[in-house]
Every structure is written in structure tokens, then in C-alpha cells.
Amino acid sequence: MEQIFKEKVVIVTGSTFGIGKSTAIAFAKRGAKIVLSDWLEDEETEKIIRENGGEAIFIKCDVSEEEDVKNLVTKTIAHYGRLDFAFNNAGIEGIPAPVTDCTNDNWDKTININLKGVWHCMKYQIPEILKTGSGSIVNNASIAGLVGFEGIPAYVASKHGVVGLTKNVALDYAKQGIRVNAVCPGVIQTPMIDRFTGGDPKVLKQLITAKPMGRMGQPEEIAKTVVFLCSDAASFITGQAIAVDGGWTVH
């Protein structure tokens, strides 16, 4: 595989499972040095990358805590000396409930991780990317950042916020060599969707049949989009929220 990111450094938050894990591995296969980050220890992803000849370190981080994020970026620079790309992927689905039943704790936790966490990350990533002269950030939103979904107001609000924040930051840094985009996955085969459906095959079938392509997406398909957005092939793309959803949002 072409080493298009050789000597480049990328931070991937939420790297332990699903989309984050697949994206970290995809970057590593293309030569990038990976900084894995999650609030859970992530030995497996690091092991996979190293066994395949890649380079990676893990730094524990709760993105809702500003000092954790500051530490993540500081340690990245201390270890690798630079930062070129970031995939701000860490997020939670929260507890499903209509707005009148959504608790303060659920609202605050979901917003703090999904939206405030992305803000924390970019706040500390951007100054370091500027030092390299150019780079790219991809934030993980969701199709719930593009349309509404019943019963998950905190999640929908947080992901709409990620899309808006992405557009704003893209404008702020367009002339300084940093491109900022959001990827908006549809229903993807991850532990999150397993939790969301409660393992109910009927609920899962409803989600799949609602997709024009008639199947569930795979984490690797999101990873390919993130890699593309950070590559030179996407050199004129910034401020975009790109749906990777099997056609969900067009019908």
C-alpha cells in the first residue's frame, strides 16, 4: 500500500473500538505514526499496528476534560515532535429519551464528550498543526448532525453542533493551511449500534432496510473517507460535512 502519510503524525481519539480503531489502522498502513487515545486502555489497536510494521503509542484521555486533551497533545509533540492530522472521533450515544425525559446528567455528558470534546481537541491540535505549515482535521459527526432522529435529543444536538463547529473552524483556518471537515456516518457495524439497538434483530433490520443500499456500513468504509479527507486528493475540500450513509439522507 502506498505510504502517502510517511513521517506524518495523526491523533485518533476514541481509538479502542469501531470507527476509531479502523481509522487508526488505515492511517498506519499508509505510513503515518499514530497516537491512539481513549478513556479506556487500548493495547489491542496498538498491537495490531505494531505487528503490521507500523508505529503507534497510546495516551489515555477523556476528551471532555480539557487538561486531558492538553496533555494528549503535549505528549504527542514530546514523543513525535509534530502533528499533521487529527481524527476527533470520540463520542457516545447517550441515553435514548424524548426531550421531556432527557436528564440533565445525560444532556451534559453527551454534549461534553461529543461536542465540547471536539472543541477541546481542535483548540490544542491547531496550534501544533500550524507549526508544520499545513494539515487536516476530520471530526466525526453523524447523519444525526444533518437530520433529526426521534428520542435522542442530546445526541442530535451534539452532532449538529459538531457540524457547525467544523464549518466555523474551517473558515477560520482556510488561509493558514489547515483543512477541517466532518464525516457523518450512517448505521455502521460498531459496538455503539449494538448498544443502540439493544441487540434486537427487528430494530436492526428496520435500520438496515431504511437504507437505499440495503445494508449496514462497515467501520473500514468510514476510515477510507477519513483517510481521503486528510490526503492530497482532498486538497480543495474544507468545511464539508460528508455523509457516508448508504444513501440514507437523500431519500
Image: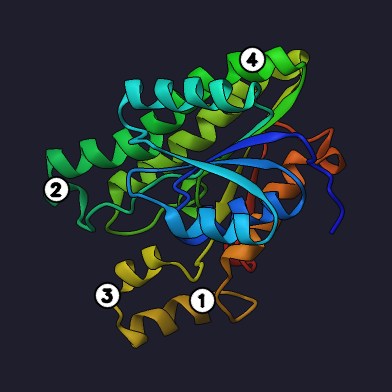
For mark 4, what is the residue?
Answer: 172
Q: Earlier in the sequence, mark 2 or mark 1?
A: 2
Q: Amino acid at mark 1?
A: Ala
Q: Is the image coloured rainbow, by chain, by secondary structure, or in one colour? A: rainbow
Type of the residue with mark 2: Thr
Identity of the residue drawn at 76% across and 46% down: 31
**Disc 3 crowd, CA 10 A, few/some/many (<14, 14-19, 20+):** few
Instruction: Say which mark, if any, is on residue 34.
Output: none
Q: Earlier in the sequence, mark 3 or mark 1?
A: 3
153 relative position to 78: left or right? left
Q: Name the foreground residue: 19 vs 198.
A: 19
- Residue highlighted by disc 1: 210
The answer to whether the residues at label 2 and label 1 have Cβ atoms under 8 Å apart is no
Residue identifier under label 3: 198
Numbered tag placed on residue 100 in the rendering: 2
Q: Amino acid at mark 4?
A: Asp
Q: Nearer the viewer, mark 2 or mark 3?
A: 3
Pick whichever of labels 2 and 3 is earlier in the sequence.
2
What's the residue at 73%, 18% (across, down)? 132
Q: Residues within 10 Å of mark 4 (few under 14, many from 20)?
A: few
